Image: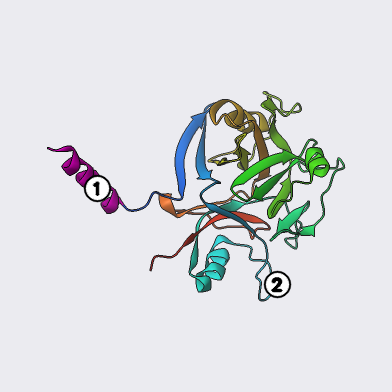
């Protein structure tokens, strides 16, 4: 077969296969625990944060509501997970930015609960990249995120595990979070399939996913929307939601 025919044959196969999935999800085993890991190319895909309906001002609170809100504009939700801690009325606990406007302020002090277990951090979405940034560094550098959500604790800081994570901890919850590469192109989201410790979850990002920065989003209420693998978690109404937005087919 000539080189030209081979190239045409490969092009036809690619066309039949359709476009590459916006988000690649897979199962990962680590420390005797199962996780679902979804990777996003932040330089190519459109990452957004969602909190309230633009018309009513009411909390969106679910993946289905986010998808429905996108539909009139010819968009769809290709991937999502809960994206940070929130109060009972769905207000974010820490910094929250949408469309470049801060809707909740940065919190820099220590406090009760996981959020206040410093260092905590910010997931920052900018043009062509996404980064997990430790909170005090975020305050110093003011990176100008078009979208951002604060949560805590940090799981991995500059390649090191959070200093308060203990291998023999008995605190176990279903947990979810995100890690980012040094160049900001790779955003790796993970959720445990069963209750795990902070140590098990943090070492997943450090040792298996190999990201230098990683941030805990939440535990117990952790949810994932990944239609590519047929997953749509329901349950508790959520506060901030992070997702990848795609276009509906014509």
Residue at x 82%, y 54% (from the top left corner): 105
Q: Secondary structure at mark 1?
A: helix
Q: Quadrant of the C terminus?
A: bottom left
Rounded to the nearest angstrom, the CA distance separating label 1 from label 2 is 46 Å
Magenta residue span: 1-17
Horizontally, residue 106 falls left or right of residue 215, namely right
How many circles with numbers are drawn on the protein?
2
Q: Secondary structure at mark 2?
A: loop
Where does the image place residue 3, in percent across and percent down from the top left?
Answer: 18, 38
What number is the disc on residue 52? none
Where does the image place residue 185, in percent across and percent down from the top left?
Answer: 56, 41
Residue tagged by mark 2?
A: 57
Above or below, comparing residue 53 to residue 183 in the picture:
below
Main structural element of the magenta stretch: helix, strand or loop? helix
Residue tagged by mark 1?
A: 13
Farthest right residue in view: 109
């Amino acid at each position: 077969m000539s080189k030209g025919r081979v190239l045409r044959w490969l092009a036809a196969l690619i066309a039949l296969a359709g476009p590459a999935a916006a988000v690649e999800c897979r199962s990962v085993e680590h420390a005797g625990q199962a996780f679902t890991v979804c990777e996003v190319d932040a330089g190519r895909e459109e990452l957004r944060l969602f909190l309230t309906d633009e018309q009513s001002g009411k909390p969106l609170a679910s993946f289905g509501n986010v998808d429905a809100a996108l539909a009139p504009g010819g968009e769809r939700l290709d991937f999502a997970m809960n994206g940070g801690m929130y109060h009972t009325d769905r207000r974010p606990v820490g910094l929250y930015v949408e469309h470049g406007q801060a809707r909740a302020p940065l919190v820099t002090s220590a406090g009760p609960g996981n959020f206040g277990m410093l260092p905590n951090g910010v997931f920052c979405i900018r043009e062509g990249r996404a980064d997990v940034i430790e909170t005090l560094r975020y305050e110093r550098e003011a990176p100008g995120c078009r979208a951002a959500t604060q949560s805590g604790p940090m799981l991995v800081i500059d390649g090191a595990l959070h200093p308060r994570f203990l291998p023999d901890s008995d605190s176990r919850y279903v947990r979810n979070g995100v890690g980012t590469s040094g160049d900001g192109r790779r955003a790796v989201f993970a959720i445990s399939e069963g209750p795990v410790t902070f140590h098990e979850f943090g070492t997943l990002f450090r040792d298996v996913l190999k990201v230098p920065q990683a941030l805990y989003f939440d535990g117990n209420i952790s949810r994932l929307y990944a239609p590519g693998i047929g997953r749509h978690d329901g349950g508790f109404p959520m506060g901030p939601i992070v997702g990848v937005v795609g276009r509906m087919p014509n």
